Image (cartoon, rainbow, N blue to C red):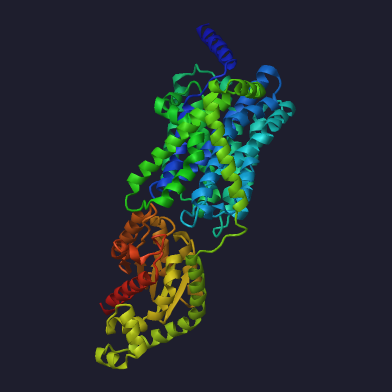
Amino acid sequence: MEQSYTRLTREAVRRQHAGKRRYITGFDGIRTLAVLGVIIYHLAPSTLQGGYLGVPIFFVVSGYLITYLLIQEWDKTQGINILGFYGRRLKRLYPALVTMLLGTTAYITLFQRSLLLNIRGTVLTNLIYGYNWFEIKHGQSYFDRFSGESPFTHLWSLSIEGQFYLVWPFVVLGLLLFLRKRLRAAAILLGVAILSAVLMAILYDPANTNRVYYGTDTRMFAILIGTAMAFLWPAHKLNPQVTSAHRLILDIAGGLSLLMLIWMFFNMSGQAASTYRGGMFWFTLLSGILVATVAHPGSDLNRVLTNPVFSYIGQRSYGIYLYQFPVMIFYEARVNIGNHPLLNSLIELALIMLVTELSYRLIENPMRHYHYGQLTQDVVQYFHQPSRHRWASGLGVVAALLFSLSAVGFVQQPASAQPTALQKTITARQAAAKKKNAAAAKKQRALAKAASQRKHDKAAALAKLSKADKKIAKTYFLSVDELRISKQTPLTAVGDSVLLDDSGDLQQVFPGAVVDGAVGRQADAVPGVIHSLAQRGELAKNVLVNIGTNGYVTPQQADDIVHAIGTDHQIFWVTAHVPTREWQDSVNNRIAKTAAKYKNVHVIDWYTTAKTHSSWFVSDHVHPNNQGNRYFTSLIAKAIAKETKA
């Protein structure tokens, strides 16, 4: 009898709870976790290599909440007000988005006109929520943080959400009308989510991740997992009165999923094949479990993730995400952050929060609650009593200025990207290096055969030194012995644009050097390049590695590079001089640790040599000028000569 009464009481509580709309405060905590992951990743990718995974968390939360609210509306009214849904979404998202687009375009029109390329397409596709597909064709990799990154790149995810909002009320309406059992709807949605994840795995291309990273079809599984959870686990129908055992199960499931998500933040690289072949899908499933446990009124996790700080950040997470990239890119274009990464990261974070707060108070909150039906009346009142609406006058002036500057940017948009002097130089030197590589490969083999017969006779070497060689020795500050060793050393050099910039000097001192460089190359691409060189017979016993300019190097990537080259080769790894980027110190620490781990890896410390010589570099502070290339080549030649003599 007592058990029956308890069940009846619980059922009454459940029915009473089902009729109320509950603001799930713990979702602000989840949003905080997601946005902090993204921000830390963008500020310090070497610290949190999986921080980009905050976006799938946003997708799951969005999928769950939107579907849950539509289902709750159906349960109350037996209908869905689609126009009302669209109106709420537009009022919530559009004002801040338009402000960011206009403000960013105005800034680059005034101060960074090189970023005006494709600005019309960028702004227009963002306004119609199709930017992710535009980015697949026109954008650079999300993980290329050096080569002129766009302040709009991160908006790809907002376009996917916008596409979801456009069709989802009709999908939910169809599922509710034609499927009596909501479990079937959840199963269908989960099935489509699995298909999306499989498509990501099939279309993944390590040479170009843009298609799977930005594609709606390959990223939709995260939103669909959230929607399936809403059909299976709608918050308004969950009973807050649960047994102690059920509460413990909910808390353990939520706690474990949260810990595993944090672990994956630190360990799941966005450039690893495993991420796209199942890793991101499993991460998203864990996010779904976390969302489900926080949504349940009988779980303690909602309370754990509820506090004033999380509420503040969570409620502003949309603005924080929106304004982060423009602030970072504009700040880092003016300040060399590499030598003081922590201090500059804190300054950038403060600027992001300041811009977000201004937007939240002046744009997002007022526009979300504004009744657009009274717009005509407000305009009439303004013209009759302008003194009572001075704030409107100020906003009007600012808006007019932003529109005007954006229009100028649209008009002045270059038809195509004009290569800079540095880009022209690198392109020319890359072409020259390719021409020399064939001859250098033959010389490599000849030098390798002659190595066993060679005698280290300094006097003979000095006598045989031609006028041209004496000039080379003088140009690159080399002794006779250092130049002799360099000319007799077969070398394969693999690297990025810094290596390409130096290729002419390097092949002058090392006639037997095969140079393989690429603009924007990162560590994950090097093993494939090494294997290709080995197959062509162009992998010498001495290998120069110049990688780290364009992004951090993980321990696994460093190991993969060494193993691809082989422990029977001597590896000379040049440290990175990238004072404009956070990862400079991280890359150099990784190179030092790799050299300590492998006896055949030797450090050529370009960073320490060059850090006090700003006159050695062009305006980007990263690529050496002609003088800098002389010192760069000299350092390499001296290091290799020293190791060879030893």
Residue 293, relative to residue 412: is it above or below? above
Q: Nearer the viewer, residue 485 or 541?
A: 485
Query: Which residue does the image show at 56% across and 62% down from the upper left?
Result: 418
Report how many numbered discs are placed on residues in the image.
Answer: 0
User: Which residue lies most toward the top here?
Assistant: 1
Residue 393 image-quadrant placement: top right
Q: Position of residue 429 (x, y in %)?
A: 48, 73
Q: Is residue 312 left or right of residue 206?
A: left
Report if residue 31 is visible in the image: no
- On the image, which quarter does residue 222 sit in? top right
**Residue at (63, 40) in percent of width and height:** 127
Residue 413, horizontal then vertical, whole percent:
60, 53
Q: Residue furthest right?
A: 178
Please say if 309 is above or below 552: above
Q: What residue sits 61% from the left and 25% below the top?
A: 69
Q: Measured from the top left, where is residue 344 in percent x and y?
A: 36, 46
In the image, is residue 117 above or below residue 467? above
Percent across and percent down for residue 220 are 61, 42
Q: Nearer the viewer, residue 230 or 169?
A: 169
Residue 12 in view of the camera: yes
Q: Is residue 233 above or below residue 122?
A: above
Image quadrant for the C terminus? bottom left
Q: Foreground residue, 335 or 440?
A: 335
